[in-house]
Image: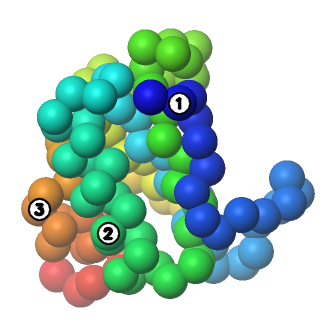
Amino acid sequence: MKTARELKPRRSPSRPPAGTLILRLYVAGTSPRSLRAIQNAKEICDEHLEGRYELQIIDIFQQPALAKDDQILAVPTLIKKLPAPLRRFIGDLSNRKVVLVGLDLKQR
């Protein structure tokens, strides 16, 4: 598995456009739960964010310093960095309703 790769949309290293969600998904190699979390995150972003997101996938085995900086205690973990407030989702993201509500994409 490659380290911290960016998934669409690509942007310049400057500030992201307004309304863009900045997401980090921490995984542990190619474990089944990690692969499910990656697939679910991609599907949620493609279906509900349509180009208004940046998803960074980080393998904690290859980049442990990033996991330490974000205080990752369990994987897979999805973090919504921006816009505030910061939110964390632990697990393979299969409960889409919880993720969508947490990302403010759906009402409770």
Camera-side residue of 7 and 84? 7
Q: Farthest residue toward the left?
A: 95
Label pair 1/3, CB-CB below 8 angstroms: no
What kind of residue is marked 1?
Answer: Lys
In this view, 21 is above or below 68: below
Helix, strand or loop at mark 2: helix
Helix, strand or loop at mark 3: loop
Q: Is residue 81 visible?
A: no
x and y, in percent, of residue 67 in the image: 48, 22
Helix, strand or loop at mark 1: loop
Q: In which quarter of the image is the C terminus?
A: bottom left
- CA separation, marks 1 and 3? 26 Å
Camera-side residue of 92 and 31? 31
For disc 3, the marked residue is 95
What kind of residue is marked 3?
Answer: Asn
Which is more foreground, mark 3 or mark 2? 2
For disc 1, the marked residue is 2
Residue at 58 percent of width and 77 percent of height: 52
x and y, in percent, of residue 57 in the image: 48, 41
Q: Quadrant of the N terminus?
A: top left
For disc 2, the marked residue is 43
Residue at 26 percent of width and 59 percent of height: 40
- CA separation, marks 3 and 2? 12 Å
Which is more foreground, mark 1 or mark 3? 1
In the visual, does 106 lie left or right of 57? left
Packing grade of label 3 (10 A; few <14, some 14-19, many >=20) is: few
Dividing the picture into quadrants, the one containing residue 34 is: top left
Packing grade of label 2 (10 A; few <14, some 14-19, many >=20) is: few
What kind of residue is marked 2?
Answer: Glu
- First in sequence, mark 1 or 3: give its number: 1
